[in-house]
């Protein structure tokens, strides 16, 4: 069961399909550092590190035509972001799904999975959603489209994504229903070393045994812990964090310590018995959201963020810290991808 992953990022979607028994044969990612991380974790996959708009589709995808069961991918969605200004119809980044569809039209896979931010369904009064559905319909696909929240599928994070699941023919393959497997922040990270600001190394041993089924699952076949390095916060930031007790946020800070921010949950601790807010590409900064450790005076590490995204510990993130944050913050949680892949596999077996 061959799969092509376009706009692959570091490979969250890919990993969910691999875990379900699919074979990723080709991936495409424009960012050189992210493509490197993908390749290190998927050495057998052919990686095309290039802008998809510059590719000659017939020459690049000829050997995969009608030999690929599934195409998956997440065309970049910056133009639909809830942060800052949204240009929608005037933002060329919002039309990359058209290149995605050109590959689909040429390769003709049986199934297609496209993920994006929820705003793609409502932007411009649903214009983008209608165009995407019309594109799939014109190519002979039937589509199920919903907003899925990763927290309802066993991911310890509230992360909503718009998912289009298309199948050739007039019979639909439906997206998976919620599993209602609730996993908390503490279920995910309580076994990791309690680092202070600036502590940690690229690789280290596990200080504790697994304390939850989730940790046991993510630690499977892992003998060394990677990417667990705490940001070296400024003395002023540590002073402010020290004023915030467990479960609290900026509401307890003196007026002189309050700053304006476009992000919700700034200078707030994660609540260990709850699920995480959406992990973004700035999870190392207390002013960027509720990313402070539940008890320690620091923000979460890349490994803690990866745990909250449901990446197994065997998946290692390479490159500069800024790239690692992009790799993790922009990824589709593998456990959510696994649920989608399982729905497709069951449909195939019918």
Image (cartoon, helix red, strand yellow):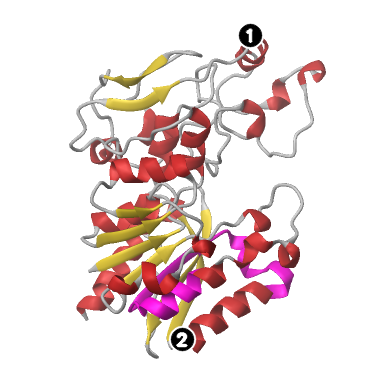
| Sooner in the amino-acid sequence: mark 2 or mark 1 | 2
Q: Position of residue 277 (x, y in %)?
A: 55, 42
Q: Where does label 1 land, which residue? A: 235
Q: Is residue 31 at all visible to an observer of this figure? A: yes
Residue 138 higher or lower than 190, as above or below: below
**Could you tell me which secondary element the residue under label 2 belongs to?**
loop
Q: How many marks?
A: 2
Magenta region, residue range: 100-126
Magenta highlight on residue 51: no
Q: Quadrant of the N terminus?
A: bottom left
Residue 212 higher or lower than 25, as above or below: above
In the picture, measured across the screen, residue 1 lies left or right of residue 8, that is: left
**What's the residue at 42%, 75% (across, down)?**
104
Of 5 and 51, the residue lying toward us: 51
Magenta highlight on residue 112: yes
In the picture, measured across the screen, residue 163 lies left or right of residue 288, that is: left
Of 292 and 327, the residue lying toward us: 327
Of 49 and 137, the residue lying toward us: 49
Q: Where does label 2 land, which residue? A: 139
The residue positioned farthest toward the right in the image shown: 256
Density class for disc 1 (Cα within 10 Å; few <14, some 14-19, many ≥20) is few
Q: Quadrant of the C terminus?
A: bottom left
Q: Position of residue 33 (x, y in %)?
A: 45, 39
In the picture, measured across the screen, residue 253 lies left or right of residue 38, that is: right
Marking on residue 134? none
Q: Is residue 176 at all visible to an observer of this figure? A: no
Q: Position of residue 32 (x, y in %)?
A: 46, 43
Asked if the residue under mark 1 is in contact with the one under mark 2, i.e. CB atoms within 8 Å, the reply is: no
Front tag of 2 and 1: 2
């Amino acid at each position: 069961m061959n799969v092509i992953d376009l706009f692959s990022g570091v490979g969250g979607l890919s990993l969910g399909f691999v875990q379900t028994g699919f074979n990723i044969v080709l991936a495409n990612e424009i960012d050189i550092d992210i493509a490197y991380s993908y390749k290190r974790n998927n050495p057998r996959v052919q990686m095309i590190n290039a802008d998809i708009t510059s590719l000659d589709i017939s020459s690049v995808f000829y050997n995969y035509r009608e030999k690929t069961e599934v195409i998956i991918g997440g065309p970049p969605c910056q133009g639909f972001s809830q942060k800052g200004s949204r240009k929608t119809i005037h933002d060329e980044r919002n039309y990359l799904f058209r290149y995605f569809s050109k590959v689909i039209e040429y390769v003709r896979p049986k199934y297609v999975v496209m993920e994006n931010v929820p705003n793609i369904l409502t932007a411009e009064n649903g214009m983008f959603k209608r165009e995407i559905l019309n594109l799939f319909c014109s190519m002979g696909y039937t589509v199920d489209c919903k907003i899925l929240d990763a927290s309802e599928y066993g991911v310890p994070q509230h992360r909503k994504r718009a998912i289009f699941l298309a199948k050739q023919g007039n019979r639909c393959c439906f997206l998976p229903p919620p599993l209602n497997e609730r996993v908390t922040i503490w279920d995910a990270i309580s076994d990791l070393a309690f680092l202070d600001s600036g502590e940690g190394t690229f690789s280290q041993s596990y200080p504790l045994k697994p304390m939850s089924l989730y940790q046991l699952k993510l630690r499977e076949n892992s003998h060394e812990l990677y990417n667990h390095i705490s940001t070296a916060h400024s003395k002023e930031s540590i002073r402010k964090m020290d004023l915030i007790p467990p479960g609290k946020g900026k509401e307890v800070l003196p007026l002189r310590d309050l700053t304006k921010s476009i992000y919700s949950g700034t200078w707030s601790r994660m609540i260990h018995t709850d699920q995480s807010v959406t992990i973004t590409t700035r999870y190392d900064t207390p002013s960027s959201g509720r990313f402070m450790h539940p008890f320690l005076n620091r923000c979460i590490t890349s490994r803690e963020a990866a745990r909250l995204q449901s990446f197994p510990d065997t998946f290692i993130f390479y490159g500069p810290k800024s790239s690692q944050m992009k790799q993790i913050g922009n990824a589709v949680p593998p456990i959510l991808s696994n649920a989608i892949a399982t729905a497709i596999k069951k449909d195939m077996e019918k």
